[in-house]
Image (tube, rainbow, N blue to C red):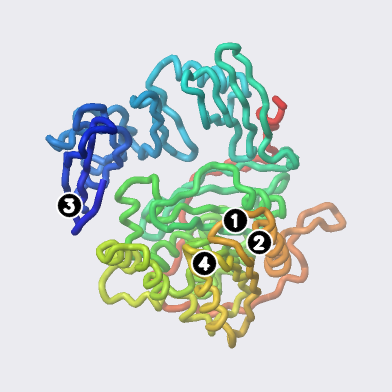
Amino acid sequence: MGLKDETVSIWYRADAGADLQKIGAFDRDDARASAAALSMEGGTNRSYVLQSIDDAPVGLHLYDYVTGEVIETLYQNEYWDVEDVWFRDGKPLAVSYVDDAQRIVWFDPADQELYDELLTALGGDGLRISVTSRSRDNDRMLVWAGHEADPGVLYLFDRAKRDLKVLAPLRPELDFHLLVRPQPIAYTARDGATIRGYLTLPRGREARELPLIIMPHGGPFGIRDTLAYRDQIQLLANRGYAVIQPNFRGSGGYGADFYDLGIGEVGRGMQNDIDDAMDWAVGLGIVDPGRVCVVGGSYGGYAALWAVLRNPERYRCAASWAGVTDWDRMLRYDRKYLSRAGSRRWRRQIEGEEGFDLSDVSPATWARRLNRPVLLAHGTRDNNVPFKQFERMVEAAERAPVPLTQLVVHGAGHSFARKRDEKQWYDALDSFLAQHNPADQLNAEGEWKAPDNLLNDELFTPLNIQQAEPENADGPDVDLPSETPESPVQETQ
C-alpha cells in the first residue's frame, strides 16, 4: 500500500519474480483505503481485511480490490471489533476481539477443542490462555496462561505427547495471594453516554469511603483499558486505594459512534467522563469524595494535570508520567512525523470545531494557579511527548502557590524499557501519594480509619470551561469481593 496526494494505492504481485500491479486506488477517506489488508490470496486480487462495513463493528472479510466487493464475511461480532487475526498457510486460523478481556474464536473445531482442553488442564474458570508461538507443524506451542490478578506463566506444550511444561512464571517474586481482581463497571455520563471501565478494590477492606485513584489511559483515541494484569494497579490496591480505569469517550473497541464522541473533546467531554467516574463511585458510597487523586501516563498524565487545574475542588493531587502540558506545541511537534493532510486531520481530532483555543485546556497555560500537589515526571529521551513539555510546565508553574514535585528519569523514553526506570516512578508515586492522599490506617481497635492528619482543605474555584456541573450517575450493582480466589495458574508450578 502507498499514499500519494491523498490517494491510497494497493499493489500486488503473485510471486517474488512477478511485477507489481496496481489492483486498487481509493481516496484516503474511503473506508476501503482504511481496511487493514492482512493476507492476499495467492494469484488473485482478493485479500483478507479487517474492516467496518455500514458502521458495524470491524469484522474479518474477504475483499476483492478490483470489483470493490466483499466476497465473504468470515467473522463479524455484533458488538465488538475484531482486533487480531492468526493465519496458517495463508488462511485464517482464528480471530480475537475484546469485550472486557480478549476472546478467541477458532475456525477449525479441532483447534477449538485443543484450546478448551488446555483451558481445562490449566484450571479453567476465570483463566485466560494465549498461544504466543507455534511450530510450523503445529505440534509444539508456547502457551501463556494468566488473568487480571495473575501475571501468568509461560508453558511449552507438546501436542503429540500431550505434555505441558512450565518454562517461566512471569512474576515469580509476587505472592499472588496479595493480588486482587479488577471488575468491569459501567456508569452514565452527564450527557447520557454509557462509559465503561474497571474498578479494583483493596484486598480485605470494606468497599466504603475508600481513597480513590482515577487512572485514565493514554492515547487518547482508539486506546482502551481491558481486564489485564498491570503492576501499577496492583501496587495502588496493595497500598489501600480503590482504582478506577475509565474508558472515556474516544476510547477504542466500542465502535465508531463512541470513538466519534471523543473528537474535539480533549480536556472537555473526555475530562467530564473522568469526573463522572468519581461521582459514580461516590454515589455508591465506595469512595470518600475528599480523598481522590488522578494518576496517568501520556494522555492520562495530561488528564491528571488538567484534573487538578480545572477542578481543584474535586481532587487532592495528581501524578503525571510523560503528560502533555501544551497542546499547541505538542501538535507542532507532531507535524514532524505526519503529512500535511495527516497533521490537519490530527489537529481537527484534538481541537474539534474551528476557533477553539487549545491553550484553554493546556495545563501550562494555567500552571500559575496550581494549588494542589502534583508529581510531574518525564523521561529525557521521550520521542512521543518530548521532554520540552516537562520543561514548559516547570517554567510555567514556577510561581504557583503549590510547587511541583519533579522526577526526571535520565535516559528513559515514553514508556519504561528498563526496570530501574519503572522502579523510580513507582517509588516516587508511592511516596507522593502516601504524603498527599494517604490511605486508611489501622487504629488501636483494629479498624481501618482515615488518617487524622488529613488537611481540611478549602474549596477552590474551578476554571469556567465545562458546561455543566457533574451529576451523580446511577451505576450497576458491583460485586465487592473480600477475597481473591487462589490462582490456578500458579498452583500448576
Residue type at mark 1? Answer: Phe
Labels 3 and 4: the sequence-earlier one: 3
Q: Which residue is mark 3?
A: 27
In front of the other: label 3 or label 4? 3
Could you say where residue 388 lies in the image, as x and y percent from the top left? Answer: 51, 74
- Badge 4 is on which residue? 323
- Under mark 2, the amino acid is Trp
Quarter-wise, where is residue 98 in the image?
Answer: top left
- Which residue is the site of mark 1? 416
Alpha carbon separation for disc pair 1 and 4: 14 Å
Q: Residues within 10 Å of mark 1 (few under 14, many from 20)?
A: few
- Where residue 421 appears, as percent x and y from the top left, is 65, 59
Helix, strand or loop for disc 3: strand
The dot on residue 38 is none
Q: Is residue 61 visible?
A: no
Q: Is residue 307 visible?
A: yes
Residue 469, given in percent of the width and then of the height, sits at 43, 69
Q: Earlier in the sequence, mark 3 or mark 1?
A: 3
Q: CA distance from mark 2 to mark 1?
A: 9 Å
Which mark sits nearer the N-terminus, 4 or 2?
Answer: 4
Q: Is residue 109 left or right of residue 151?
A: left
Q: Residues within 10 Å of mark 4 (few under 14, many from 20)?
A: many
Give amino acid for label 3: Asp
For disc 2, the marked residue is 425
Q: Quadrant of the C terminus?
A: top right
Give whichever of discs 1 and 4 has the lower sequence position: 4
